[in-house]
C-alpha cells in the first residue's frame, strides 16, 4: 500500500525489450479524478506505459501501484480481478469482440464482475443510449462505423464504473472530427463520474482538456509545457 | 520476384513452428494410413499369388476328383492308354513341424522325374550342397525352402519331425534347400517338397490330390471326351480364382477403410494447408498492393505447399511402410484363418505404390493450398486485406459446400441403385453419401449452435453467449476440421454398429446351426448308406444320456463357376438347424428330405444369382447333374457359398461313404461330464477323432470373428487419430488467429483460468456438435455397410441392430478428442502475453 491519495503511482520504473530500453526512471503519480495525457510520437513507449499501469505487462525495474496495490505483489489472477473491477480500457483499434453484439460487448465487463444479468443488460442499454447508440445495440462490430465502434468501446470501458480508465490512442483510428467528439465524450464521462483518465495519444487535441500533459522522450517521462 | 515471397513464407513457418509441425504431422499421418493399407494389401495379394504359383507352376489344367481324391490307377491309365501327355501327379497336404508352433505348412508330394515341365523342383535353384537325387532314391526325405531352414535353424542332413492331421509324427531327413526364381526368389512362400510316395505314406492314403497337365487344345478336347468316372478337368489356377473371389471382397473392404482414412486425411491436409494460406490472406493483399503479380503469388504458395507436402509425404510413406509391416501380418493371419489353412509370409509390395502415396500426399497439399490462394489472388488487394471479407468468403464457401451436398447425395444414391450388384458402385455411393454429409456439417453445426445461443446466454449470461458465438464464428475456419472429426466419429459409429450387428447375427446363426452338445471331427470313417447308425456310430448313439447323433460329410466341388461346398447331413433329433430365408413353394426342408432338390446358402444364391425354383448344375460321380434349388438359408461360412442336402442323396450321387463330423445330442438332465467321459472312452481307440464342445466351437468362431475385425479396429483408431490431429491443428490455428481477442478479454479482467475454461468450453461445444451430427451419418453408414457393402462383398445378409453403445462411444470419442485437442491451445491462450498480443495489428 502507498500512503498517498494517488490512483496510480510508478516508482523508478524501467522497461526494456532485449537491448532496447523503452522506458527508464519513470516516476509518476496520478491523483484520483485527474485527467493525464501522455503525448508523444509513435513508438516512444506510451502504450508500454499504459500496459504497465494496467498490469498487462511487467516492468523490468521499479514498482507500479494501482489504487494502492503493488502490482508485482499480486498473482496473475489477482491482477485480472483488479482490472475487472477497477480498470477500463479503450484501444486504438476498438478491439470489440467480433462475435458479440454492441450490447453484449458492453455487458461483458459487468458479467465478469458477476453483475446480475438483468441489471447488466439494463445498464448496457442505458449507457448505449447515453452515447447515442440505442439503435446499434443488436448490431455486430463489423456492422458499425469506426466512430460507433469506439463509442461502444468507451461504453464497455466505463460500464462497470472503474476507478481508472486507460485509453491508448482512442482517436488514432478515427477522422479528426469523430476523434474530437469521441475524446470529448470520454473526458465528459470521466469528469462527470469523477474517474481517473489516462490517455496516450500522438495528437494535441487533448491539450485543452487534460489536467496534466506528459511526454515521453528518450525513454523518460517529462512534464510538457502548455 | 518469387524469392522474397518464399523467404517470407519460410519465416512465417519458422515463427510458427508448431503450426508447421502440425501441418507436416497431419499430412504425414493421412498419407501413412493410405500407403500403409495399400502396401499391406499388395503385399498380401502378392504373397498369395506366389504361394499359388509355386504350387500350380506351369500347368494349364488340372484333373481333380469330384468329391474324393484321384486313385493312383487313373494316373497310370492316362499314361499308358491316353498318352503322350505332359502330366505330373501331385499330392498336397497341410503339415505341422515340431518346433514351429501352431503354424501350418504346405507339403507337396511330386514325381521328380515329371516335374521339370511344371515346377522344376528337381533341378531348380538347389544350392550346391543339396542332393535332389536323394529325394527319389531315399524314402522319408524332404526339400525345404531356404528361408524356412534359416528360420528354424535346420541344416542339410538334419531331421525334421512332421505330422499330418492327428497322426503320429514322422521324422524326415532334409536333403536340400529350394528357391524358385520365377515366382518366389526369396522362397518365402514355397512349400516343402517330398517324393509322392513319402507324402502318401504320411497321409496314409494312396490317392492323388490332382494331376497337373500342360495341354494343347486338341489334347484338352480328347481328355474331356474320356468322361473319366468321378474325375473332372478344370483350368489350372482355379484355386487362385477362388482366392480372388473370396479374399478380394475382404481386401476391398480394407481398401475402402484406407480410403476412408485417406478421406479424413485429405480433410486434415486441406484444413491445415488452406488455413495456413487463409491466415496470411491480408498479407497477400499487401503483397498485391505492393505490386506483386497474381501469378507470382500463386507460384510462391504452391512452392510452399509442395515443400511442406513433399517433406510430410516422404515421412508419411516411411510411416506407412512401418504401419504396413504390422497390418500385413494381421491381414495374412485373417485371410489364412478364413480362407486357407496355409500360412503365407509377407513379401515386398510393388514400388509403384510408394509413388502413388507420394502423388496423393503432394497432390492434395497442392490442391488444398491452391483453392484459397486462387481466391485470395482473385479479389482486389483491399478485399484480400479485409478480415470481414475473409469471414464473408469463408461463409460463402461453407454455404456453397452445403448447396453441393444435395446433388452429391443424389449422385451417391443413383450410384447405389444403378448397379445393384456392383461393389465399386456401392463404395462410390457410400463415399458420395459421406462427402455430402461432410459438406453440410459446418452449416448444420452453425445452425444448431446459433439456435443454442439464446439458451446458453440465458443460463450462463454473456460468457455463455461468448462461448457459443465464438464457436459459430470459428466454424467458418474450423468447419473442415469439424467435418473431418464428424466423418471419423461417424466411421467409428457406423463400423461399430455394423460389427455389432454382424456379430449378433453370427451368434444367432451359431445358436441355430450348432444344435448338438458335442461335435466330433472324424477322419477316414465310412458310413453305411442303408444303415448309417450301425457299428461304432450306433454304440455312440446308445450311450445312456445321449439322445441322438447327426452326421456330416463335407466336400468341395470344383465347377466352371468356382468352387461349391457341399454339406451332406443326416440331421439329429433337433432337425437341420437351418434358417430358411427364401422358402419358395412348400416347406423346403420337407421337400429336400423327400429328395426333390437341395438348399443353397444365401452367399451362393447371391454369387450365382440363384433363387428357389432355379436349377444348379454340379459335377457328380456320374457326370454333371442338375439339382433343383428349393430355398436359401443363412450361413456365414467363408467358403464362398455352398449347398446342403441329405446324406443319403449325397452318397447316391457321389458314391462317397466318408464322414467328416458327428454331432452328439445329450438329454437335458444328464451329467454332461460323465457322458463326455463315456464318449471319450468309446472314441479313445480312434486317434483320428477330435471331440469339441459346442461352447468351444462357438467361442472359437467368435474369436476368429473378433480377430477378423481387429484390423478394422486398428484402422478406425488411425482415422480417429487423423481427425484428432486435424482438430488440434485447427484449434491451434484459431489460437493464433484469435490471440488479440483473447488479449482484450484478459485486459477486461478475464483470468487465465477463465480464458482456458472459455476456450475448452468452445472446443467441447465443437466436439459435441461434430459428435451429434456424426450420429445420423454413422447410422446411415452402418445401414449401407450392412445392407449394401457386406451383401455385395460376401453375399451375407444380416440384421441391422442399432445398439446405444457404439453411438455413445462415438459421441464420447468426439467430445474427448475435442477436449484433448483443446487443452494445449487453451493453455497457450491463457498463458500468452497480453501486452504483446495487443500490440499486434
Image: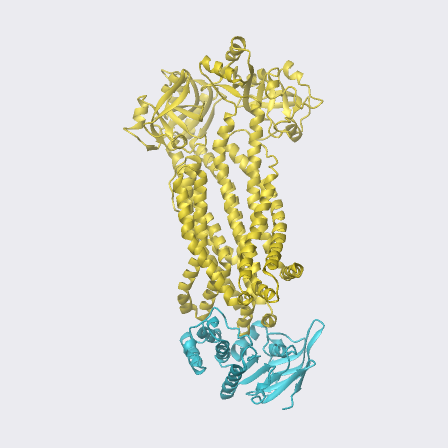
Chain colours: A cyan, B yellow
Q: Which residue sits furthest left?
A: B586
- The quadrant of the image that shows the C terminus of chain B is bottom right
Of B761 and B551, the residue lying toward us:
B761
Q: Residue B443: image x %, image y %?
A: 43, 58
Quadrant of the rendered structure where residue B512 is? top left
Of B486 and B213, the residue lying toward us:
B213
In the rendered image, the vertical position of residue B91 relative to residue A172, given as above or below: above
In the rendered image, the vertical position of residue A15 relative to residue B340, given as above or below: below
Of B232 and A194, the residue lying toward us:
B232
Q: Residue B46: image x %, image y %?
A: 57, 33
User: Can residue B343 be seen at all in this image of the molecule?
Assistant: no
Q: Is residue A172 left or right of residue A159?
A: right
Q: Is residue B704 left or right of residue B504?
A: right
Q: Residue B712: image x %, image y %?
A: 50, 42
Q: Is residue B289 left or right of residue A141?
A: right
User: Can residue B352 be seen at all in this image of the molecule?
Assistant: yes
Of B300 and A165, the residue lying toward us:
B300
In the rendered image, the vertical position of residue B709 relative to residue B187, given as above or below: below
Q: Residue A143: image x %, image y %?
A: 46, 72
Quadrant of the rendered structure where residue B189 is? top right
Q: Is residue A104 left or right of residue B381?
A: left
Q: Which residue sits furthest top?
A: B81
Report the label total: 0
Residue placed at 43% from the left, 62% from the top? Answer: B449
Quadrant of the rendered structure where residue B402 is? bottom left
- The quadrant of the image that shows the N terminus of chain B is bottom right
Amino acid at each position: 500500500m502507498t500512503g498517498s491519495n494517488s490512483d496510480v503511482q510508478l516508482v523508478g520504473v524501467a522497461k526494456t525489450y532485449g537491448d532496447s530500453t523503452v522506458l527508464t526512471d519513470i516516476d509518476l503519480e496520478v491523483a484520483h479524478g485527474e485527467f493525464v495525457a501522455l503525448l508523444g510520437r509513435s513508438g516512444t513507449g506510451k502504450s508500454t506505459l499504459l500496459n504497465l499501469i494496467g498490469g498487462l505487462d511487467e516492468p523490468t525495474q521499479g514498482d507500479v501501484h494501482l489504487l494502492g496495490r503493488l502490482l508485482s505483489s499480486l498473482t496473475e489472477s489477482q491482477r485480472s480481478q483488479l482490472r475487472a473491477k477497477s480498470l477500463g480500457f479503450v484501444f486504438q483499434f476498438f478491439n470489440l469482440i467480433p462475435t458479440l453484439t454492441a450490447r453484449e460487448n458492453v455487458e461483458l465487463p459487468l458479467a465478469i464482475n458477476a453483475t446480475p444479468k438483468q441489471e447488466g443488460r439494463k445498464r448496457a442499454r442505458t449507457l448505449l443510449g447515453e452515447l447515442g447508440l440505442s439503435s446499434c445495440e443488436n448490431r455486430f462490430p463489423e456492422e458499425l462505423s469506426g466512430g460507433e465502434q469506439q463509442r461502444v468501446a468507451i461504453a464497455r470501458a466505463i460500464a462497470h464504473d472503474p476507478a481508472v480508465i486507460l485509453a491508448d490512442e482512442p482517436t488514432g483510428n478515427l477522422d479528426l472530427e469523430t476523434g474530437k467528439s469521441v475524446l470529448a465524450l470520454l473526458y465528459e464521462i470521466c469528469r462527470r463520474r469523477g474517474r481517473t483518465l489516462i490517455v496516450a495519444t500522438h495528437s494535441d487535441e487533448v491539450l485543452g482538456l487534460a489536467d496534466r500533459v506528459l511526454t515521453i522522450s528518450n525513454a523518460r517521462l517529462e512534464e510538457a509545457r502548455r | 520476384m518469387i524469392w522474397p515471397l518464399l523467404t517470407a513464407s519460410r519465416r512465417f513457418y519458422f515463427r510458427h513452428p508448431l503450426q508447421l509441425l502440425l501441418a507436416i504431422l497431419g499430412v504425414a499421418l493421412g498419407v501413412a494410413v493410405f500407403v500403409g493399407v495399400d502396401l499391406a494389401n499388395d503385399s498380401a495379394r502378392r504373397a498369395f499369388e506366389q504361394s499359388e504359383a509355386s504350387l500350380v507352376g506351369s500347368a494349364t489344367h488340372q484333373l481333380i476328383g469330384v468329391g474324393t481324391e484321384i486313385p493312383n490307377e487313373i494316373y497310370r491309365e492316362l499314361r499308358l492308354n491316353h498318352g503322350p501327355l505332359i502330366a505330373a501327379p501331385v499330392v498336397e497336404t497341410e503339415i505341422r513341424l515340431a518346433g514351429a508352433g501352431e503354424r501350418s505348412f504346405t507339403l507337396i508330394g511330386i514325381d521328380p522325374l515329371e516335374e521339370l515341365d511344371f515346377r522344376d523342383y528337381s533341378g531348380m535353384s538347389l544350392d550346391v550342397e543339396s542332393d535332389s537325387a536323394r529325394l527319389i532314391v531315399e524314402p522319408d526325405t524332404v526339400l525345404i525352402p531356404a528361408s524356412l531352414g534359416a528360420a528354424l535353424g535346420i541344416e542339410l542332413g538334419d531331421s525334421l519331425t512332421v505330422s499330418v492331421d492327428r497322426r503320429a509324427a514322422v521324422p524326415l531327413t532334409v536333403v536340400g534347400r529350394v528357391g524358385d526364381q520365377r515366382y518366389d526368389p526369396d522362397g518365402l512362400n514355397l512349400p516343402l517338397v517330398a517324393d509322392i510316395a513319402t507324402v502318401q505314406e504320411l497321409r496314409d492314403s494312396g490317392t492323388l490330390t490332382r494331376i497337373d497337365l500342360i495341354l494343347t487344345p486338341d489334347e484338352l478336347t480328347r481328355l474331356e471326351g474320356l468322361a473319366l468316372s468321378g474325375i473332372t478337368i478344370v483350368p489350372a489356377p482355379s484355386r487362385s480364382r477362388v482366392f480372388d473371389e473370396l479374399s478380394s471382397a475382404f481386401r476391398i473392404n480394407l481398401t475402402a477403410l484406407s480410403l476412408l482414412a485417406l478421406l479424413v486425411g485429405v480433410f486434415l491436409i486441406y484444413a491445415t494447408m488452406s488455413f495456413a494460406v487463409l491466415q496470411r490472406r491480408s498479407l497477400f493483399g499487401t503483397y498485391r498492393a505492393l505490386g506483386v503479380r497474381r501469378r507470382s503469388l500463386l507460384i510462391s504458395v504452391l512452392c510452399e505447399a509442395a515443400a511442406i507436402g513433399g517433406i510430410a509425404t516422404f515421412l508419411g510413406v516411411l510411416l506407412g511402410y512401418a504401419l504396413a509391416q504390422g497390418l500385413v501380418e494381421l491381414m495374412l493371419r485373417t485371410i489364412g484363418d478364413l480362407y486357407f489353412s496355409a500360412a503365407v509370409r509377407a513379401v515386398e509390395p510393388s514400388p509403384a505404390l510408394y509413388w502413388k502415396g507420394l502423388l496423393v500426399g503432394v497432390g492434395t497439399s497442392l490442391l488444398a493450398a491452391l483453392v484459397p490462394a486462387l481466391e485470395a489472388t482473385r479479389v482486389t488487394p483491399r478485399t484480400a486485406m479485409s478480415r470481414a471479407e475473409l469471414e464473408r468468403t469463408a461463409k460463402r464457401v461453407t454455404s456453397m459446400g452445403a448447396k453441393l451436398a444435395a446433388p452429391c447425395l443424389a449422385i451417391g444414391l443413383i450410384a447405389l441403385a444403378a448397379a445393384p450388384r456392383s461393389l465399386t458402385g456401392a463404395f462410390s455411393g457410400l463415399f458420395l453419401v459421406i462427402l455430402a454429409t461432410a459438406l453440410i456439417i459446418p452449416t448444420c453445426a452453425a445452425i444448431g449452435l446459433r439456435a443454442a445461443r439464446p439458451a446458453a446466454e440465458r443460463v450462463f449470461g454473456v460468457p455463455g453467449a461468448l462461448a457459443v458465438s465464438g464457436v459459430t464464428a470459428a466454424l467458418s475456419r474450423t468447419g473442415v476440421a469439424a467435418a473431418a472429426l464428424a466423418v471419423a466419429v461417424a466411421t467409428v459409429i457406423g463400423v461399430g454398429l455394423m460389427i455389432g450387428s454382424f456379430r449378433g447375427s453370427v451368434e444367432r446363426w451359431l445358436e441355430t446351426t450348432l444344435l448338438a452338445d458335442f461335435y466330433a471331427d472324424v477322419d477316414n470313417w465310412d458310413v453305411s448308406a442303408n444303415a448309417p447308425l450301425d457299428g461304432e456310430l450306433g454304440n455312440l448313439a446308445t450311450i445312456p444320456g445321449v439322445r441322438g447323433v447327426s452326421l456330416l460329410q463335407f466336400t468341395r466341388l470344383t465347377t466352371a463357376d468356382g468352387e461349391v461346398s457341399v454339406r451332406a447331413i443326416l440331421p439329429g433329433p433337433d432337425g437341420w438347424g437351418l434358417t430358411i430365408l427364401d422358402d419358395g413353394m412348400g416347406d423346403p426342408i420337407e421337400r429336400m428330405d423327400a429328395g426333390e432338390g437341395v438348399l443353397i446358402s444365401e452367399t451362393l444364391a447371391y454369387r450365382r444369382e440363384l433363387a428357389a425354383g432355379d436349377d444348379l448344375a454340379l459335377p457328380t460321380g456320374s457326370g454333371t447333374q442338375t439339382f433343383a434349388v428349393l430355398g436359401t438359408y443363412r450361413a456365414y461360412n467363408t467358403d464362398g457359398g455352398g449347398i446342403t442336402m441329405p446324406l443319403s442323396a449325397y452318397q447316391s450321387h457321389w458314391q462317397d461313404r466318408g464322414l467328416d463330423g458327428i454331432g452328439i445330442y445329450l438329454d437335458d438332465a444328464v451329467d454332461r461330464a460323465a457322458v463326455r467321459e463315456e464318449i471319450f472312452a468309446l472314441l479313445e481307440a480312434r486317434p483320428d477323432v477330435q471331440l469339441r464342445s459346442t461352447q468351444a466351437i462357438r467361442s472359437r468362431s467368435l474369436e476368429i470373428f473378433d480377430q477378423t475385425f481387429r484390423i478394422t479396429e486398428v484402422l478406425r483408431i488411425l482415422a480417429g487419430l487423423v481427425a484428432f490431429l486435424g482438430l488440434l491443428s485447427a484449434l491451434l490455428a484459431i489460437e493464433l488467429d484469435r490471440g488479440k481477442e483473447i488479449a482484450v478479454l484478459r485486459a477486461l479482467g478475464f483470468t487465465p483460468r477463465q480464458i482456458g475454461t472459455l476456450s475448452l468450453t468452445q472446443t467441447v461445444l465443437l466436439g459435441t456438435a461434430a459428435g451429434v451430427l456424426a450420429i445420423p451419418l454413422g447410422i446411415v453408414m452402418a445401414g449401407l455397410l450392412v445392407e449394401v457393402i457386406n451383401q455385395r462383398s460376401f453375399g451375407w445378409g444380416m440384421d441391422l441392430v442399432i445398439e446405444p453403445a457404439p453411438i455413445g462411444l462415438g459421441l464420447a470419442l468426439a467430445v474427448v478428442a475435442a477436449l484433448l485437442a483443446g487443452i494445449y491451445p487453451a493453455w497457450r491462450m491463457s498463458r500468452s502475453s497480453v501486452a504483446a498480443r495487443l500490440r499486434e495489428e
